[in-house]
Amino acid sequence: MTTLNPTCMRTLALAAAAALAVGTVLVSHPDSATATTTTSVQAAKHKHADPLVFGHRGASGYRPEHTLAAYALAIEQGADFIEPDVVSTKDGVLVARHENEISGTTDVAAHPEFAGRKTTKIIDGKALTGWFTEDFTLAELKTLRAKERIPGDRPANTAYDGLFQIPTFEEVLTLVERKEAETGRTIGVAPETKHPTYFDSIGLSLEEPLAKSLKRHGLGGKRAAAVIQSFEVSNLKDLNRMVDTKLVQLVDFGGAPYDQVVAGTGVTNDYLVTDKGLRSIKRYADQVAPYKYYFIPRTADNTLGEPTDLAPRAERVGLPTVIWTMRAENKNLPVECRKGTDPIAIGDLACEVGAYLDAGVDAFFTDQPDLGVAARDAWLANR
């Protein structure tokens, strides 16, 4: 594949505004040819397509994560993509949960009929105690209700505890289709496979049902409004043979992909962001999503450090870059972007987002899509 320079990539993305060109990660809102948005006008003015905003687990800053309500709100707030993490039930159905251990995100502990399901398992080399999706049928999981995972940080979200079911991946895709019909927008979906090596080990592979669902909904092609993410390497290589959907290599900060640990390859996350590592990713994936500190580290004083050269190096290889996760609470922001002293008060998210966009990243995940979209638009307006 010919590698395009940044200007060419952005120009092509603008020209393809009517068809979501997720292959370059950089796209304008894919409305009709006559429809306009503030950001698409800004993109044309600045010769730069909009950096994409991903609703991280939906609008998880405002609703319990991985619920249809969180995804719907993210869409309403203008997110270009929503992100459902997928795990499996006992009967092989993909559901949206950040982890297969669900005591922190559901009311399962309050169900006496499931008390005997509490157990301890080794997941990716770590002992976890709780209740696990793979020990429940879908029908059983549907009797549970979601709750806020971090109530101390987001007390307002607890008002929604007990209101929403655990959605299946199919239900998420159906929601997206309905919202596309209502809004006239193309809305991207970015499923992440969680613990694929573990699920393979218990005979509940995530890749095959994920590929089937994407194909069934017309999302199995290179130009589909979808990307598939994973922190592991081998399952992305498997998916590369199953679907043409764009693939994204997630890269944690330090450590190593668990499948590489199991295989004893010696491949670490730090290696994946070297030039050689990026070239290896390009052989099976289309984008790279390292943790944000790889692009701008924090100093000892928790301020933003100097940007690294990772974004331009990835771009030279032909890998657009996505970062995670932009969270608006003061405690999650660098010092210079905070407002006041309350750690859970909302700070200046645009301050942090702008710094990373200046560093050359192409897209970002955020828990507050409305603030992320506003930050992206402000950055474009100031260019």
Image: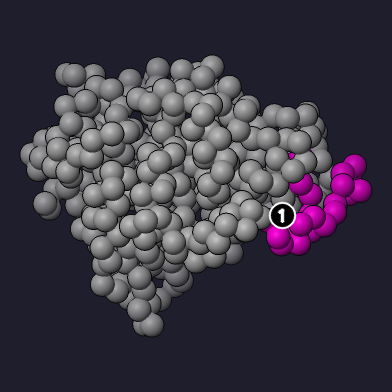
| Residue 292 x, y percent position in the rendering | 38, 60
Vertical comparison of 305 with 90: above or below: below
Q: Residue drawn at (62%, 58%), measured in percent from left and top?
A: 264
Left or right: 27 in relation to 335: left
Q: Secondary structure at mark 1?
A: strand
The crowd level at tag 1 (other Cα within 10 Å; few <14, some 14-19, many 20+) is some
| Residue 116 x, y percent position in the rendering | 91, 48
Left or right: 317 in relation to 282: left
Q: Residue drawn at (17%, 19%), measured in percent from left and top?
A: 34
- Front-most of residues 4 and 67: 4
Amino acid marked by disc 1: Ile
| Residue 369 x, y percent position in the rendering | 38, 45
Residue situated furthest left in the rendering: 45
Image quarter of residue 247: top left
Vertical comparison of 56 with 13: above or below: below
Q: Residue drawn at (26%, 56%), measured in percent from left and top?
A: 313
Image quarter of residue 337: bottom left
Instruction: Give the labeled residue for mark 1.
Output: 123
Residue 323 seen from this side: no
Residue situated furthest bottom in the rendering: 300
Q: Magenta segment range?
A: 112-134
Quarter of the image with the N terminus is top left
- Front-most of residues 9 and 129: 9
